[in-house]
Image (spheres, rainbow, N blue to C red):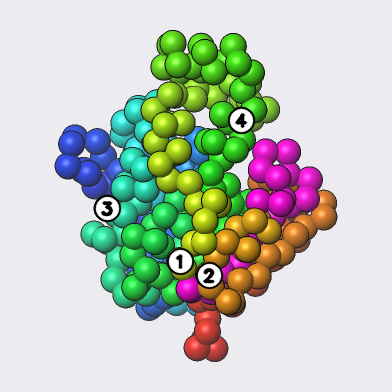
Amino acid sequence: MQQVSETDRGDGVTLAWVRTPGRGPTAVFLPGFKSDMTGTKAMLTEAFCAEHGRGCLRLDYSGHGASGGVFTDGTIGRWTDDALALIDQLTEGPLVLVGSSMGGWIALLTALARPERVAGLIGIAAAPDFTEDLMWQAMMPEERARLERDGVLHLPSQYGDPTPVTAALIADGRTRLLLDRPIPLHCPVRLLHGQRDPDVPWQTALRLAERLEADDVQATLIKDGDHRLSSRSDLALLRRALGDLLLQDGA
């Protein structure tokens, strides 16, 4: 029976999660920046696992979705720690990490922290290093000065209200960059990326594939795909990637 609950991470901030029982490997869905565990791709991952008797964990980082905490208190490191805390408490055995956008970066950091447990990784428009490459590098000098002066900068977003970017987010992200060196992961990796993604360049998937030390790495570029990758054909590719990594025993 599916469990819906929340866990205090130890400082009074509660982390929301949904766990579906099943045999391993267990899929763990890691949402994107300002996203949550109720999105189309998260629900498809859970449905796929239920269909095939695999375990699944969906979660919200602090400041996201149903979890407690304040969004602007979060950083890449803090949200990675949130994911690791729930994974350690709520799962056993091998894992397949499924990360969307920022969740792809967090999936990589999680896999590096628990390499003995990660049996596979799926990146959906994965965005490692985005705080540096896509935020800081895109800021005008006056925006950088305002961020350093005020500690926060509100950037326009095509998805709704302006996005608050904090100096702490940028500084912390700078300590967790991955694409400037080999990434010592050796599990199978599947990368899906739209070539019409306005947020994360599709070349990021190729850079990531090159940096990963694993041999079994496949990058699939979807010519008409956007950042969300939620069309019927996009989701079919996600199902195929899930099957590839979760159903290796043929079940």
x, y percent for residue 4? 33, 52
Cβ atoms at labels 2 and 1 below 8 Å apart: yes
For residue 64, side relative to residue 244 (left or right): left
Question: In this rendering, does residue 49 appear at all?
Answer: no
Mark 1 vs mark 4, CA separation in Å: 26 Å
| Amino acid type of the residue tagged 3 in the rendering | Ala
Q: CA distance from mark 4 to mark 2?
A: 27 Å
Residues drawn in magenta: 186-204
Disc 4: CA contacts within 10 A as few (<14), some (14-19) or many (>=20): few
Give the tally of numbered discs: 4
Q: Quadrant of the N terminus?
A: bottom left
Sequence-first tag of 4 and 2: 4
Q: Look at mark 1 in the image and give the residue it sits on.
A: 184
- Label 2 vs label 3: CA separation? 26 Å
x, y (%) of residue 183?
A: 49, 62
| Amino acid type at image mark 1 | Pro
Q: Position of residue 71 (x, y in %)?
A: 40, 29
Label 3 belongs to which residue? 85
Picture layout, residue 112 above or below residue 200:
below
Q: Gap between marks 3 and 1, in whole Å? A: 22 Å
Q: Is residue 196 visible?
A: yes
Q: Secondary structure at mark 4?
A: helix
Q: Are marks 4 and 3 in contact (CB under 8 Å)?
A: no
**First in sequence: mark 4 vs mark 3:** 3
Provide the residue designation for mark 2.
213
